[in-house]
Amino acid sequence: MTDTRPSFLATGRGKLTLTLLCAIAFLDFIDASIVNVALPAIRRDLDFSVQDLQWVPSGYLLTYGGFMLLGGRLADLLGRRRVVLAGTILFSLSSLVGGLAVNSGMLVGARLAQGAGAALMLPGTLSILTTTFKEGGDRAKALGVWGGVAGAASAAGVLLGGVLTETLDWRWVMLVNAPVCVIVIIGLFLLVDDDRRSADLSRFDIGGTILVTSGMLLLVFTLVKAPEVGWDAARTIGGLAGTVVLLTAFTVNEQRHRDPLLPLSIFRVRGLGITNVACLVAVAGLISMFFFLSLYMVNILGYSPMKTGVAYLPLCVGVGVAAGITPRLVARAGTRPLIVVSLLVTGAGIYWLSRIPVDGAYLTDLLPGLMVTSFGLGMAFVSITTAANANVPADKAGLAAALLNASQQIGGALGLAIFSAVATSHTESLLADGKPMAEAMTSGFARALLVCSIFLAAAAVVALRSANTHGEATDVQLEPRPEQVSAT
């Protein structure tokens, strides 16, 4: 029977709700990159060492990725609005503390708290979107807007960070969050229904929570530190081995627990696992692209923070255009061909950028590659987000959102760890051969970007095994496995 219910997205309240949810996502995504161009000013003001400065961006990624699964599950158990509100309050307060920081420890602590707040905000927000917009094409359109916001946020973070740092002060890259969070909190009360639940927390999977959070934190920490201490260092090998032990114990615990934190039945949703793997591999290359291009613009081309940010503006526009047309393409062709094509296009754009010369010019050496990348990026985020949330039952929406975003955070940390080692190794080799610093650094950046493009191609190959969905929603409940029912 044809669904004749009116479109919620076509109403004023529906549009405001989608705007609110995307604003929350934008806050979370943008804070992963907004501090990058402010790092030199932060180092001068707060007397950071070069080694400790990395924890300004990495501290956020550490807790963001580490607490993501917990945030998603709490949203499903306690109510999405309640958990998103708690995360937004924590995010706002930690942003204020960071903006007013008087020493390096205070700022790093604030960034760790920010990441934890974001981990509570994002899974619940995406699950509110996927359970609110279900009628007709509403869900596909809403996911299209969400995907566009996600795709453009990293570039917009560099843009906004540069503008705020150069026109006001680096502290505003943190302080700007507080007034936006106040608006978000008001909007949540006005636009989102109170879905609080009375979950039986006496059966809450405390053991699983400790195991998976510890495992995720150790994994991200190890990846962040690997370029500094070395991939063959005992510390890195031990960290990776410890991660395997913790996550293996977590899997065993989930199979036996009566009310698991991560019901393994969710992986019976067609294509969910493969889509998340493809996302992880793709984001590893994408996040690193922004990192190395920004270093190239600042250190080789001599761009100011603002000029570096403005250089990404065409990419933001391209992502928005591609994201806008992708929902209609998903409805016709499905997600699989779009994911594969978009990742190959993005990889081609990054390959173009990997040919940067020492005396590069923006119009000839950067802009063409950025525009190719932008169209692939906008299409990729929309189609991947749609595929990762299709056919997910409402009571697992927060968990599915957490899995997708955890894949993104781990991918980002993994990519920076691998490609930083690639760039550094190649640069040091050229310096040892007597090459000038600028030439050696540029060649190192280019080598890293080349490997980034290979990762995008690999992600496209993985995506060939993903399900071909059209963004359909379902109210089907996934039944637990028999052993989960009988186990204590």
Image (cartoon, rainbow, N blue to C red):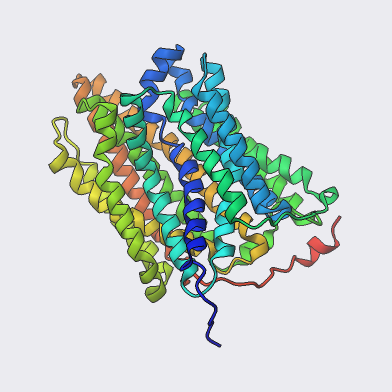
Seen as rendered, the residue at the extreme bottom is 1
Q: In which quarter of the image is residue 182?
A: top right
Q: How many labels does the image show?
A: 0
Q: Is residue 137 toward the left or the right of residue 314 in the image?
A: right
Q: Quadrant of residue 433?
A: top left
Q: Is residue 75 visible?
A: yes
Instruction: Between residue 269 and residue 313, name the one nearer to us.
Output: 313
Q: Can residue 230 be seen in this view?
A: no
Rendered view: 145 above or below 356: below
Instruction: Between residue 199 and residue 5, name the one nearer to us.
Output: 5
Rendering coords of residue 117 (x, y %): 59, 38
Rendering coords of residue 131 (x, y %): 59, 64
Quadrant occupied by the N terminus: bottom right
Quadrant occupied by the C terminus: bottom right
Q: Say which residue appears at 56% left-offset and 26% top-offset.
A: 110
Rendered view: 56 above or below 374: above
Rendering coords of residue 200 (x, y %): 83, 53
Q: Is residue 176 toward the left or the right of residue 443 in the image?
A: right
